[in-house]
Image (cartoon, helix red, strand yellow):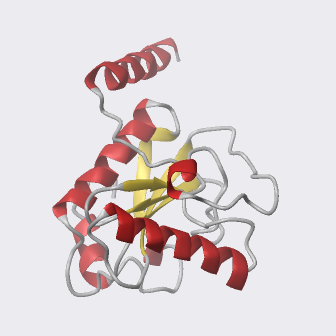
Amino acid sequence: MVGELLVVFVCRQLSLVLGACPHIITRAQWGARHPTSAPVHIGHPVHYAFIHHSAGPECHDRATCQAQVKAFQNYHMDTRGWPDIGYTFVIGGDGSIFEARGWNVVGAHTLNYNSVGNGFCFIGTFTNHLPTAAAQQAVKDLIACGVAEGHIEHNYVLRGHRDMGSTECPGTAFWHHIKTWPHY
C-alpha cells in the first residue's frame, strides 16, 4: 500500500514536471452548455478506458472540431434527453482534446459501464481507416495523464465500445488497431 502510494505520488510529480498531461480545451473554452442536472461524481479511479468514434465526419482544425463537439452536446441533450454530452473527452483529428464531462464524472457513453470507465470519443468514422496519428497520440497521452493523476487505475483495461455491447463503434479498422495498444 505504501509503495503503491509512493509510485502514484512520484508519477503525479513527474507528470507535472515533464508535462505529460496534454492541453485540454475546457468546457468554457469550447462553449459548452450547462448540464440540465448536477453531475454525478465518481469517487475513485476508473478501471476502464473506452474508445469510441462519433460515426460522422472528421475534423482537422480547432474551429471545425469545436463545432462538432457542440453538435454532439446538442444531440445528446436535445434529442436523447441526457443532462449533458455523454463522453468524458472528445478528440479531434488535429489532436485537440475537448473536455466533455471530464474526469471523475459519470458519463453516458458505454451502457452499464459509465460509472467504472471513461469514454474517449474520436471525431469521425473509422470503419475503413484509422484516426490521424495526432489524434491517437493525444488519447494515449490523455490516458497516461489520467493514470498519473489518479483518475484511471494504473492497471486499467482498454476496450472499444463494441466490446461492451452491440455496436460497430469505434469502427472496425480502429477497433482492430486498438487491440495492439497496451492494456487491451
Q: Which is more toward the observer, 124 or 117?
A: 124
Question: Residue at point 75% right, 78% down?
Answer: 81
Q: Is residue 132 above or below residue 45?
A: below
Residue positioned 31% across, 18% down in the render: 17
> Taking the image as drawn, is residue 90 in sight?
yes
Seen from this angle, which residue lies furthest right? 37
- Position of 94 with respect to 24 (left or right) is left
Q: Is residue 145 above or below residue 38?
A: above
> Left or right of 150: which side holds 176?
left
Determine which quarter of the picture holds residue 141.
top left
Query: Residue 89, position in %: x, y?
Result: 48, 57
10 vs 25, nearest the viewer: 25
Quadrant for residue 158, please give it.
bottom left
Query: Residue 11 appears at what percent x and percent y?
Result: 37, 23
152 or 22: which is nearer to us? 22
Q: Position of residue 33 (x, y in %)?
A: 67, 61
Residue at 44% over, 40% down: 146
